[in-house]
Image: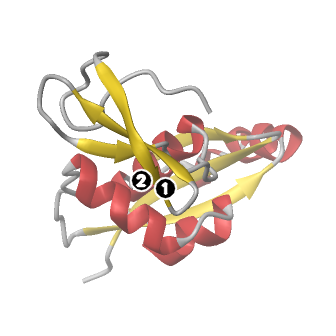
Amino acid sequence: MKLNTCPNCLSEEYIKSGVINERQRFKCKKCNYYFTVNKLGKKIDDYFVNKALQLYLEGLSYREIERILGISHVSILNWVKRYGIKRPLNKNYHPTYKILNALELSSYFQKAENLKGAGVVVTELGDKFMLIKWERFKE
């Protein structure tokens, strides 16, 4: 794997500094930090990170987002912490959601009673659409 920068200071000035556990070790010339080649791990596409954070802000729970996107709820929790996302707390409304295809979505919007007394957001999920609706709690 090709190495571009020091993970500590992002400097491009480093030298080889031995081998540890059959992996090449490097030393940064600027900050004297020792490091090895980055691990090759799987990375989740930024599209899904953004979509998960959007759904979190819309009021869905971590487990609901996990079921919709197929991404671990722990990963979503870690992203929320990493990016410092704060969800506004409003106890008068609660979100409900539906997964619809394009034909179902158009027929949903043709009925006026589906839109009264609620806010609606539509977001794309691959070849389907997610409709998120906020309804007031009955008092």
Tag 1 secondary structure: strand
Q: Residue pushed farthest bottom? A: 139
Image quadrant in which you'd find residue 98: bottom right
Q: Which mark is drawn over residue 38?
A: none
Q: Position of residue 129 (x, y in %)?
A: 71, 44
Q: Which mark is drawn over residue 118?
A: 2
Identify which residue is drawn at 19% across, 41% down: 33
Q: Where is residue 117 in the image (x, y as percent from the top left)?
A: 40, 54
Q: Is the residue 92 above or below the residue 12 in the image?
A: below
Identify which residue is drawn at 44% across, 62% down: 76
Q: Is the residue 62 above or below the residue 18 in the image?
A: below
- Along the horizontal axis of the image, is 129 left or right of 135? right
Foreground residue among 41 and 22: 22
Q: In this figure, which residue is indicated by the disc labeled 1?
A: 133
Q: Where is residue 118 in the image (x, y as percent from the top left)?
A: 41, 53
Foreground residue among 134 and 6: 6
Identify which residue is drawn at 46% across, 65% down: 75
Q: Position of residue 49 (x, y in %)?
A: 49, 46
- Along the horizontal axis of the image, is 2 left or right of 78? right
Tell me whether circle 2 and circle 1 mark residues in contact (CB < 8 Å). Answer: yes
Foreground residue among 20 and 1: 20
The three-letter amino acid code for the residue at tag 1 is Lys
The three-letter amino acid code for the residue at tag 2 is Ala
Tag 2 secondary structure: strand
